[in-house]
Image (cartoon, helix red, strand yellow):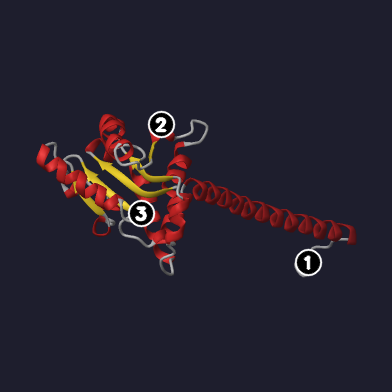
Amino acid sequence: MKNGTVTNIWSLKSQVENMDVSCVSKFWLTFSVVGSCLLTRSIISAILGYHYRWNIKYWMRTNCRRGPVYDELAMEHYQFDAFVAYNYSNYQWACIVLRNVLETQNNYTLCLHDRDFPVSVSIQQNIVDAVNNSRKVILVITRAFLRSDWCEFEIQMAGMRMVTDGREDAIIVIMMEEIPVAEMPRSLLNLWKNITFLMWENEQTNEEIFWDRLLEVMARP
């Protein structure tokens, strides 16, 4: 050899075989590392995609829509006239006062989660179904509602519905108390210019005006 070392053919063959084994080992090591990274990334992406699937749908419908798809004939196929989203602290008002005026006195059909959500279905899917199966969405806003776990999700689904239908009167916001803008979620503020806004005031004169206004909005397609 060039460095003056004398070797025989068997020793040279052994060295070449060792080099082949080393190269193959490095290849499979690299392949295993890259494969593991890709698999891990795919699993994480799948988990995140499933967890945020409704957020993704909301973003796609908001940013990729081509135009209104609302069909007035489809109104006849809604199961409910309105889905009422409320915090349990407002159960009495939503399920007794509001229900009495809209359902008992005016024959509207409401979806109330304490009464109409199937227990065999997840809360998330129940909300999606309720929004999709209702002609309108009524958000009963209080500080307790804004602090609730499902507040953001209900607002986003209502916003998606408004975008899908191409209608600005699909969402009715009822403010049960005065709340500074700084305390409201961005998802609600983004819809603020495109929703019907009503303020509840527990006084007889103002109460009559409130119900007249609500019934006027409910009568719209």
Asked whether residue 77 is in view, the answer is yes
Q: Position of residue 24 (x, y in %)?
A: 75, 56
Q: Position of residue 35 (x, y in %)?
A: 64, 53
* Image disc number at residue 151: none
* Image disc number at residue 4: 1
Task: Give the residue type that dot 2 points to.
Answer: Arg
Q: Which residue is at the front of the view, 197 or 21?
A: 197
Q: Residues within 10 Å of mark 1 (few under 14, many from 20)?
A: few
Q: Is residue 108 left or right of residue 8?
A: left
Choose the circle earlier in sequence order: 2 or 3. Answer: 2
Q: Position of residue 207 (x, y in %)?
A: 15, 40
Circles 2 and 1: CB atoms closer than 8 Å = no
Q: Gap in Å between the C-alphas at discs 2 and 3?
A: 24 Å
Of the 4 image quadrants, the one containing the N terminus is bottom right
Q: Gap in Å between the C-alphas at discs 1 and 3?
A: 82 Å
Question: Circle 2 is placed at which residue position?
Answer: 115
Of the 4 image quadrants, the one containing the C terminus is bottom left
Task: Give the residue type that dot 3 points to.
Answer: Gly
Question: Circle 3 is placed at which residue position?
Answer: 159
Count up the numbered dots. Answer: 3
Q: Position of residue 194 (x, y in %)?
A: 27, 59
Q: Which residue is at the front of the view, 178 or 134?
A: 134
Q: Is residue 69 left or right of residue 169?
A: right
Choose the circle earlier in sequence order: 2 or 1. Answer: 1
Asked whether residue 178 is in view, the answer is no
